[in-house]
Image (tube, rainbow, N blue to C red):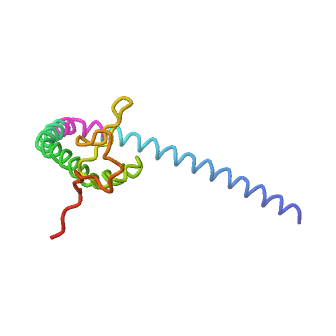
Amino acid sequence: MDDWMKQLEATLAQLVDETEQWVSSAVETVVESSDAIAEDLEQLLAPMMDPLRDDLERNLDDFVEAVEPWADSMVVNIGTWVEQAMTPINQVLDPLVQQRTHCVGCRNYHGQMYGDQELVCAIHPFGPDLDREACPDYDSIWPDRP
């Protein structure tokens, strides 16, 4: 009984080795054929690709020339829109952070540092009089309701 098991094992091992060799050979053949086909296609298509590439570059350049002014104006418009949209937020948050409660929401608020001096606004460079209840020159950033 041991003999036929050993013989079966040897036969299966040989079958595995032969199958492995056949698969390796087949894969190698497919890779070589694929490389040859790719080279042939490249040589066949190369003369057609150069004019196509030139046309594409020319059309792309024309497209960029046509779109660039529009895109530039869009960037400027978007920048302006973002600035306008953020103004109320900046005019509220910045004075709060700087502890300028009289200036919260005021259109005149500037709040930038120049050297070691802060310019609060053009009307009150050092800030409004804190003894008063409200700034007499307050101009709300919020539109009046109808």
84 up-or-down from 40: above or below? below
Residue at 28% of width from left, 39% of height from top?
A: 125
User: What residue is rendered at 78% in x and 58% in y?
Assistant: 9
Determine the residue positioned at 25% across, 49% down: 83
For this orientation, the residue located farthest to the top is 115
Q: Quadrant of the C terminus?
A: bottom left
Q: Quadrant of the N terminus?
A: bottom right
> Is the stretch drawn in magenta largely helix, strand or loop?
helix
Measuring from the top left, give residue 68's x and y in whole percent. Answer: 15, 41
Taking depth in this image into account, of 11 and 140 the one nearest to the observer is: 140
Q: Nearer the viewer, residue 102 or 146?
A: 102
Query: What x and y, as percent, mark residue 81?
Result: 21, 52
Magenta range is 42-53
When the figure is inspected, residue 26 is found, relative to residue 39, above or below; the finding is below
Q: Is residue 114 left or right of residue 122?
A: right
> Could you say which is closer to the camera, residue 54 or residue 27?
54
Q: How many marks?
A: 0
Magenta region includes residue 52: yes
Residue sitting nearer the eye, 75 or 25: 75
Within the image, what quadrant is residue 145 found in? Answer: bottom left
Rendered location of residue 121, percent (x, y)? 27, 42
Residue lying farthest to the right in this orientation: 2
Q: Is residue 31 left or right of residue 48?
A: right
Q: Is residue 28 magenta?
A: no
User: Which x, y percent locates residue 134?
Assistant: 30, 55
Residue farthest along the bottom direction in this orientation: 146
